[in-house]
Image (cartoon, rainbow, N blue to C red):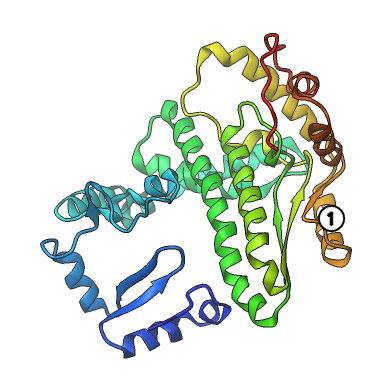
Amino acid sequence: MRVDFTSQEFFRNPAAGIERLRACGPVVETRFPIVGKVWITTTYDTTARVLKDSTTFTLRKDGSPAGLRWWMPAFVGALASNMLTVDEPDHTRLRDIVDEAFRRRAVLDMQQHIRAIANDLAEQLFADGSPADLVQRYARILPLLVICELLGLPPSDRPKFMAWANTVARLTSVIGVLRMIQAVLPGMRRQGAGQIVNISSILGFLPAPFMGVYASTKHAVEGLSESLDHEVRGFGIRVVLIEPPYTKTNLDASAAQAEGRIDAYAAQRRRTAAAITQNTNSAPEPRIVAEEVLRSIEGSYRMRRPIGQAALLSWLRRLLPAAMFEPSLRKAFALDPSRKGAVTEPRP
């Protein structure tokens, strides 16, 4: 039974797709994107029986979540290794612990405290003035702070938890790009034309000291986009990469940070963070990204579309030897001068 789980038809009415599967029986063979052939249960009773029968079925294989493929990035396995992929009796034991912390009564008892947390965040937001990023500085932080309260995390451990949550969000953003591509490609192939526009960054082709996790997601988007462009070109589909420079956002505050800070880097990290903050504060508005997206749609095709300063730096990195380019780059990040001859050759 074939159901396209990435099609617009399925997203518009997933219940109809599930009903088609259910009509074929309680257990149906189908295919999932990326994973490939799978067997799925289509009724509650069958699903419950499978989950409870740990003798015949298991959620683990050799200690790791079942279904992982050798070629999948390591972080996919890390995300998949959670309470939902643990067999009985460990699943019930862990669920009971979580239920105790997140039961409805616990949340209701904290109602006044949650309101106080929300008010404190709002006051900080208003005190800093405009412009303000409500998503990054309020909507994303509030639920994380409430979870910290429910789990009883001490204040000293909360920055680690917040950094971990932000790191997961950065990593899954690459998966989000991939899922969106999978959703739109079938329709583009059918019509024999289309253009996929992915937002990368200047940090998709330049290094980013002390922002390696963020830069790695942009490098991943670049590699994915360039590879995909070759795969779909025969169907009349092209892929575009928008590569903006720093823009006036809260990148400096929201970028994932290392969980454990090493004192040896402290002074250098502070200088680099100050340089990044200065660059973002004096950067152009995000509107330039939207304008470039529009130009990429209406104008002639170019795969890579660096904007402003990013265009100059992209050109210079290709033109200049590393020994000439890297000192300027390190100066821009307020990095100490590197040792003589210690340069990194750029990718071809």
Specify whether residue 113 is in view: no
SS at mark 1?
helix
Q: Nearer the viewer, residue 266 or 75?
A: 75
Q: Left or right: where does residue 71 sit relative to residue 121? A: left
Q: Determine whether 288 is above or below 325 in the image.
A: below
Could you say which is closer to the camera, residue 237 or residue 216?
A: 237
Front residue of 187 and 120:
187
- Amino acid of disc 1: Glu
User: How many numbered marks have been drawn onto this rendered protein structure?
Assistant: 1
On the image, the x and y values in percent for residue 151 come to 35, 41
Q: Quadrant of the N terminus?
A: bottom left
Q: Is residue 5 above or below residue 175?
A: below
User: What residue does disc 1 label?
Assistant: 292
Quadrant hosting residue 177 = bottom right
Q: Residue at x 18, y 50 (%)?
A: 90
Residue in the image at 68% along x and 19% along y: 343
Asked if residue 213 lies left or right of residue 30, the reply is right
Find the residue positioned furthest to the top. 340
Q: Position of residue 120 (x, y in %)?
A: 58, 39
Relative vertical location of residue 192 with respect to residue 261 in this rendering, above or below:
below
Quadrant in which the C terminus is drawn: top right
Mark 1 closeness class: few <14, some 14–19, many ≥20 residues within 10 Å: some
Q: Quadrant of residue 51?
A: bottom left
Where's residue 213, x and y in %? 56, 36
